[in-house]
Amino acid sequence: MDLETFRRRLTAHGALPVHVRRVLRLWSQGLPQDHGRRKPQDTLPAAVRAELPALLADLEALARVDSEHPAADGARRLLVRLADGQGIEAVLLPRGGLCVSTQVGCAVGCGFCMTGRSGLLRQLGSAEIVAQVALARRLRAVRKVVFMGMGEPAHNLDAVLDAVELLGTLGGLGHKAIVVSSVGDARLFERLQALPPGAVRPALALSLHSCDDARREALLPRAPRLPVAELAAAATRWARDSGYPLQVQWTLLAGLNDGDDELEGLVRLFAGQPAIVNFIPWNTVEGLPWRRPDPARSVTMVRALRERGVLATLRQSAAQDVDGGCGQLRARVDGAAGADAVPLRRIDRARPAAAAAA
Ligand SMILES: C[S@@+](CC[C@H](N)C(=O)[O-])C[C@H]1O[C@@H](n2cnc3c(N)ncnc32)[C@H](O)[C@@H]1O
Ligand code: SF4
């Protein structure tokens, strides 16, 4: 369901904009509808009150916790069941963050990501995205939402931007506490730049993984064919316009994107820019051919960037000990539907141009 359908249903029962806002504010903040001093009988028209239990039951059914998997780092990975039985992942991160999914599966097919192995199964509606936040807030406070779960936000832009707008207004989150993570797509950059004054302006994370066009193309086979230099320029432009630094996401794969050539590329693209490079050692997915780099190499990479004027950190996937990589929990519990649908292509670090043609 999308949020607009829900708004229309309320309006059809005589709700005014102020009533619609009240219902959505309480729902998206995980609060009961009788929360606060002013009760529904003081504020909502009788017809809306009569319909409210059915409407709320439909919202409730959008996303339910199927199972909860606490991790050693304090994160909690949730398998969330949607109304049609599909499963998605949401992760309660340490320090009040929440990672939400935007699609069931993903069409980009990154060679290291479990979610990408199934291809796209379906889009999430904007209400299903916000429902993950509402549900999480009934478990714990949520002060930051990152769109870094299953799916590529740029492939579901209307729903993602509707959810962002609601979360940054009635949902009570600061704009910089909303982070949209994407492989980068001209449509995403255009839509962000076209946001009207006063709209919620999310922070951006760019999943780059390589500065070499051919290597990146082989690793992210169905990401838009934008040269890395153009991607970086568009993303840092948004960082300047929004006022929030760009997060450059870099899943570290030993022997593939942990070389000095990549460090040179990162310095060229991001030295002096409002950007921070997050190196994240690959979370092993059984059956895939990659390896995590030696920890000492990861640390050296961070130091090398810092010494040359690029902000850099080394992070670990949250909830690593409980199917930490995106899509792994869903695949284990629900079965990896179509897990072999996306063939892996050979990627050769030494000869990236040849790899792209493979
Ligand atoms: C799951 S994606 C979702 C958002 C968007 N599709 C993207 O790629 O930015 C979020 C991040 O998870 C990372 N990721 C996926 N599988 C991973 C794994 N097995 N280990 C480490 N990071 C992984 C991706 O590299 C990406 O930066
Ligand atoms: S990393 Fe992101 S874009 Fe790539 S397959 Fe996974 S979800 Fe899709």
Image (cartoon, rainbow, N blue to C red):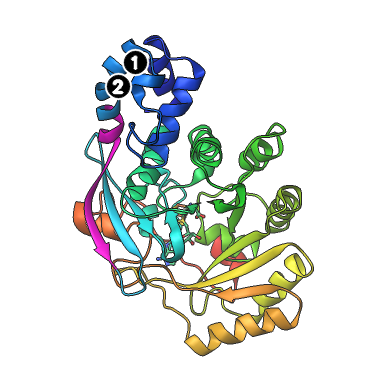
Q: Is residue 243 visible?
A: yes
- Name the residue tied to disc 1: 48
User: Residue 192: horizontal and vertical position, in percent?
Assistant: 66, 40
Does the magenta stretch mainly form a helix, a strand or a loop?
A: strand
Residue depicted at x 37% and y 48%: 137
Does label 1 point to a residue whose CB lies under 8 Å from ligand 1?
Answer: no
Relative vertical location of residue 160 with respect to residue 38 in this rendering, above or below: below
Q: Secondary structure at mark 2?
A: helix
Is label 2 in contact with label 1 (beta carbons under 8 Å)?
yes
Relative vertical location of residue 2 with respect to residue 297 in this rendering, above or below: above
User: Residue 120: horizontal and vertical position, in percent?
Assistant: 38, 43
Residue 110 appears left or right of 267: left
Q: Secondary structure at mark 1?
A: helix
Relative vertical location of residue 146 with respect to residue 269 in this rendering, above or below: above
- Please count the marks in the image: 2
The front one of 1 and 143 is 143
- Name the residue tied to disc 2: 52
Is 266 part of what is drawn in magenta?
no
User: Residue 337: horizontal and vertical position, in percent?
Assistant: 25, 49
Segment tinted magenta in the rendering: 58-70
Three-letter code, disc 1? Val
Q: Which residue is most to the right?
A: 272
Tell me how far mark 2 sits from mark 1, CA to CA: 6 Å
Q: Residues within 10 Å of mark 2 (few under 14, many from 20)?
A: some
Q: Quadrant of residue 277?
A: bottom right
The front one of 273 and 119 is 273
